[in-house]
Image: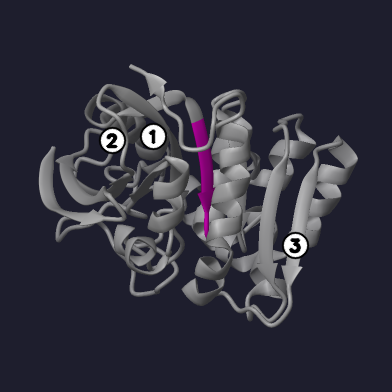
Amino acid sequence: MEVVSEARAHGGTQGVYCHRSVATGTDMTFSVFVPPHREGMRLPVIWYLSGLTCTHANVTDKGEYRRVCAELGLIFVAPDTSPRGENVADDDAWDFGQGAGFYVDATQAPWAPHFSMWSYVADELPALVAANFPVDMDAQGITGHSMGGHGALTLSLRHPGRFRSTSAFAPIVAPSQVPWGEKALGGYLGADRAAWRGHDSVSLIEDGARVPGLLVDQGDADSFLDRELRPHLLAAACRAAGIPLELRMQPGYDHSYLFVSSFMEDHLRWHAARLLAGRSTGEAVAA
């Protein structure tokens, strides 16, 4: 693992790191904020998955999470959204190819050789972070924005017990039913829609997947709301399955990082209440 940069922030360290990924066969970059803590202690971790066109840098630069993470004692990890490079397949469209990995393992040409973002975020990156940072892997939370909200929801639904807390900002909740998702899942996984269900939150819930509860924020002025996001489908699925969902429609907010940063503190405190249960605020556990 190569250190790209490290800087002091709110008493902790904001770093950017690069490594050679086995899953994608490419170099992958990610950011990690480690709050101030006592030597030898391990801290809860929040995984943040970004949306279409983003890299690790969008939330790192615009997410406004460090002050609250420093206060609460939360590590914050933000990976990239796809493999990248001259020898990696791409598409001219902004919503497909590089920057739009959709957190799946592609099975179709020309994407299959590198686009294994599911394996990367579910297995490889957590193992790397656990080996190199003071994380308490028994206290994990996950969140994300848009395409990353889709990734956060599906990862949590398919790994019961791994994440104590799950939230999302303007997530794509039913990719099998919206243009972004139909394009991505069809392009990466092929035409068999049955293969898509494992990467569709609403379908996963319909098929029996469960989480203890969800927090979702959605701007009601989001231009993608009715066509691509459709949170009412998640609300209906959760209601039918008995999953507690706090869906907050935020008046006047759009799809941008101005929206995400406005409610980041709420999400981090919501996660902390679940990850730090039984501890004092900001208290870590011994390694």
Judged from this view, the residue extending furthest toward the top is: 287
Residue depicted at x 21% and y 52%: 16
Q: Cα distance, mark 2 to mark 1?
A: 6 Å
Considering only order in the chain, which callout, 3 or 2, is on the residue closer to the N terminus?
2
The mark closer to the camera, 1 or 3, is 3
Residue 76 x, y percent position in the rendering: 39, 46
Looking at the image, residue 44 lies above or below residue 74: above
Q: What amino acid type is highlighted by mark number 1?
A: Ser
Contact between marks 2 and 1 (CB within 8 A): the answer is yes
Magenta residues, start to end:
140-145
Find residue 279 and report its image quarter: top right
**Mark 2 neighbour class, 10 Å CA radius: few under 14, some 14 to 19, many 20 or more:** many
Residue at point 38% right, 56% down? 66
Which residue was labeled with disc 2? Answer: 23
The structure residue drawn at horizontal position 36% and vertical position 66%, both measured from the top left corner, is 58
Q: Is residue 195 visible?
A: no
Q: Is residue 30 above or below residue 118?
A: below
**Mark 3 — residue?**
248
Is residue 142 highlighted in magenta? yes
281 sits to left or right of 67 = right
Q: Quadrant of residue 275?
A: top right
Residue at disc 3, secondary structure: strand
